[in-house]
Image (cartoon, helix red, strand yellow):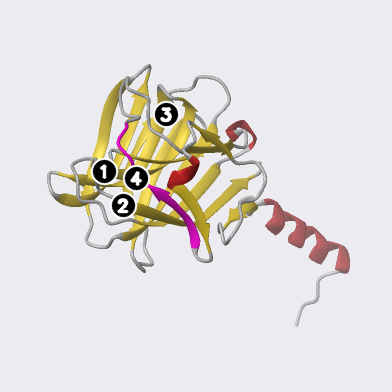
Amino acid sequence: MKLFPSWAVLMFACLAHSTQAPAAESLFKEEFKGQMQPGWTWLREDRAAWRLTASGLEIRVQPGNMWGGANNARNVLLREAPDPARGPVEVTLRLENHPTGQYEQVDLVWYYDDSNMVKIGQEIVDGALTVVMGREQNDRCRTVSINPISDRKVQLRLRVEGGRIRGQFRPGEAEKWSDAGVCDLPVKGPPKISLQCYQGVPGQEHWAKLSEVILRQSLE
């Protein structure tokens, strides 16, 4: 058996390590179990329409809209996003909602301001439960995709790399992520992560449950 000198073994190990993809660093995990970690802020807060429980954050899905020029949804939740110029950013949301009204939705959003964002969310469209991905720039909206699902529990994921963003979803306890689409970013200043619930049916009380947010970045 041929033995390599120790310096050669070390060199091969260093070369192998240098060819590996950068590991994703878990920057933040929020489970909302009875409390919220520092860093979240509310936009147009209605304190009576959100609550923290032992199993997550519950937000009442009220009338209001973020799609287009209305920009009047209540309890829009925001936190700082890492700079994607340092490496790809990935954020996931686990949620459950039982929508009944047209366009009633709960969204995970890459947010710049009320008029510039990319969303992926669970939504009722023409009576069907779906995951919808959409892009908005200067209040001009474009639907990227509409994807039927059968489970009211769903995980949503946004991945930002360079100037592009990819949306994915995973209903129920599915192991495989499905693609919702890819689009360019409507950049306008520093980005934020946003959780949004809106287009609720007037007079009906629906509470969406948000149970996990995970934020990762692969540093280059």
Q: Position of residue 215 (x, y in %)?
A: 57, 49
- Circles 3 and 4: CB atoms closer than 8 Å: no
- According to the picture, the residue beneath numbered tag 3 turns out to be 117
User: Closest to the observer: 138 or 18?
Assistant: 138
- Circles 4 and 1: CB atoms closer than 8 Å: yes
Residue shown at the point (28%, 38%) measured from the top left: 199
Q: Secondary structure at mark 1?
A: loop
Q: Secondary structure at mark 2?
A: loop
The amino acid on which the numbered mark 4 sits, given as a three-letter code, is Val
The amino acid on which the numbered mark 3 sits, given as a three-letter code, is Met
- According to the picture, the residue beneath numbered tag 1 turns out to be 104
Q: Is residue 185 left or right of residue 171?
A: right
Q: State yes or no: residue 32 in magenta.
A: no
Sequence order check: which comes first, mark 2 or mark 3?
Answer: 3
The amino acid on which the numbered mark 2 sits, given as a three-letter code, is His
Asked if residue 158 can be seen in this view, the reply is no
Residue shown at the point (58%, 25%) measured from the top left: 190
- Circles 4 and 2: CB atoms closer than 8 Å: yes
